[in-house]
């Protein structure tokens, strides 16, 4: 069974996120991948899938690499933090790094979570907030932090405590974007943060 067989719509979501968050049209993405615009449209709609080779190339282009974060200021900041914080690739939602406090909250260790997509096992309210975030991204610049309230979850691959999450987008030196997700209290919501 290939990755495409396991979750045929994961790639469609990643392509749509990549395009929306970068303000690109499907035609531009088609040029990037050397395919027709209609192929990109079908991939995004989930009505067709790229070949296994194309899939690998697309994932390589789209996502932030775990090694890109490993030796940076962001990695040191997150790994030494007492806060519940983690960083994911903004496109693939794969975990790049997390604080010890976040792993404790999740009830898992680094090896179980590292470089795995978090969104597919996230609480429903976080998944819905991601959809609203993408809709919001169509209309607004993404420089401001995003805040959302989650009811959390106690079942699934990892646990999430109820509360507020602050999403901040950061660009790495290689040009890829990551999202820093920090658990905060209502009193710590920054002025100007946008609720999704």
Image (cartoon, rainbow, N blue to C red):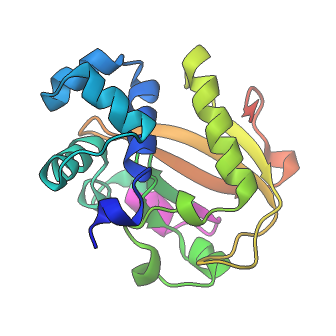
Q: Could you say which is closer to the camera, residue 127 or residue 34?
A: 34
Q: Could you say which is closer to the camera, residue 180 or residue 23?
A: 23
Magenta span: 75-85
Q: Could you say which is closer to the camera, residue 63 or residue 49?
A: 49
Residue shown at 28% from the left, 23% from the top:
38
Q: Is residue 107 left or right of residue 15?
A: right
Q: Position of residue 158 (x, y in %)?
A: 62, 76
Q: Quadrant of residue 65?
A: bottom left
Image quadrant for the N terminus?
bottom left
Question: Is residue 121 inside the magenta stretch?
Answer: no
Residue shown at 52% from the left, 62% from the top:
118
Q: Position of residue 45 (x, y in %)?
A: 44, 35
Residue 73 position (above or below residue 25) = below
Residue 11 position (above or below residue 27) = below
Q: Is residue 112 left or right of residue 165?
A: left
Question: Is residue 77 inside the magenta stretch?
Answer: yes
Q: Could you say which is closer to the camera, residue 167 or residue 34?
A: 34
Q: Is residue 54 left or right of residue 79?
A: left
Residue shown at 39% from the left, 39% from the top:
47
Q: Position of residue 173 (x, y in %)?
A: 27, 39
Count of numbered marks:
0
Identity of the residue furthest to the right in this view: 187
Inspect this view and state whether residue 44 appears: yes
Image quadrant for the C terminus?
top right
Residue 119 position (above or below residue 108) = above
Residue shown at 55% from the left, 25% from the top:
142
Inspect this view and state whether residue 140 appears: no
Q: Position of residue 5 (x, y in %)?
A: 34, 64
Q: Is residue 78 left or right of residue 188?
A: left
């Amino acid at each position: 069974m290939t990755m495409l067989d396991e979750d045929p719509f994961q790639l469609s979501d990643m392509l749509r996120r990549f395009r929306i968050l970068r303000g690109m049209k499907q035609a531009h993405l088609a040029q990037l991948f050397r395919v027709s615009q209609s192929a990109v449209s079908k991939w995004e709609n989930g009505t067709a899938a790229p070949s296994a080779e194309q899939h690998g190339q697309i994932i390589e282009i789209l996502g932030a690499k775990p090694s890109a974060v490993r030796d940076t200021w962001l990695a040191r900041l997150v790994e030494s933090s007492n806060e519940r914080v983690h960083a994911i690739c903004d496109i693939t939602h794969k975990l790049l790094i997390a604080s010890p406090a976040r792993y404790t909250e999740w009830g898992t260790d680094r090896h179980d979570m590292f470089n795995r997509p978090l969104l597919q096992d996230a609480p429903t309210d976080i998944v819905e907030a991601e959809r609203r975030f993408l809709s919001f991204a169509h209309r607004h610049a993404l420089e401001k932090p995003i805040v959302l309230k989650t009811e959390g979850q106690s079942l699934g691959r990892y646990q999430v405590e109820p509360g507020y999450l602050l999403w901040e987008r950061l660009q790495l030196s290689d040009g890829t974007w990551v999202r820093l997700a920090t658990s905060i209290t209502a009193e710590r919501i920054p002025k100007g943060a946008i609720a999704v």
